[in-house]
Amino acid sequence: MQAKKQMRKSKKGVELDMAPMIDCVFLLLIFFMVATTFAPMPGLRVQLPPPGKPNPNKPKGLIIRIANPEPGQFQGVMMLNEDVVQFENMFDMLVNKPDEVKSMLIIQSERDVMHEQIIRIMDISKQSGIDKIGFAVVARE
């Protein structure tokens, strides 16, 4: 009977020391954070003009002005050199312009115009052969 009591006393539960395991996890975390590289997301390259006063000269080329959409409307009214234009006939209007005028397209939009509308204009202008696209801002008074 005495032997059984000694046997029970000598048996201890197995304990794991968590400190070395936590150290290993942190080392792995640091390794993966340092070794991971993130691929740059593709996007549009935009050259912004240097800060300063706006150019008083009227830009050469085609100008598309986009007004803010009316309440309840999805798109703003687009004007191509003082002519109202829709997406359906924009390609034909741009293709039929002379080459010296088609050298550059300037998009002038108001503050609340959806980006989707501007990107769609850029796509149509690229398809019609216009390589240079610029953006203009109306000076606030």
Image: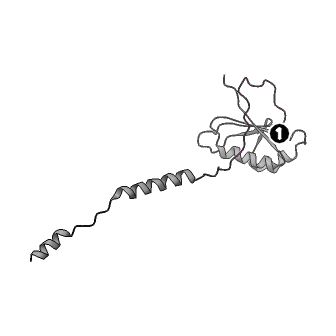
Q: Does 68 sit left or right of 24 as displayed?
A: right
Residue 118, percent from left and from top? 70, 43
Closer to us: 114 or 73: 114
Residue 101, percent from left and from top? 87, 38
Q: What residue type is labelled 1?
A: Met
Residue 34, percent from left and from top? 55, 50
Our reading of the magenta stretch's main secondary structure is loop
Q: Residue at x 77, y 25 (%)?
A: 55
Residue 32, percent from left and from top? 53, 55
Instruction: Assign the C terminus to one quadrant of the image.
Output: top right
Magenta run includes residue 47: yes
Residue reaching furthest to the bottom: 1
Q: Is mark 1 on a helix, strand or loop?
A: strand
- Give the extent of the magenta segment: 41-61
Q: Residues within 10 Å of mark 1 (few under 14, many from 20)?
A: many
Q: Is residue 70 above or below residue 139?
A: below
Instruction: Assign the N terminus to one quadrant of the image.
Output: bottom left
Residue bearing mark 1: 104
Q: Does 3 sit left or right of 75 as displayed?
A: left
Q: Which residue is drawn at 82% across and 44% down?
A: 131
Q: Does 10 sit left or right of 30 as displayed?
A: left
Q: Residue at x 80, y 36 (%)?
A: 81
Closer to us: 2 or 127: 2
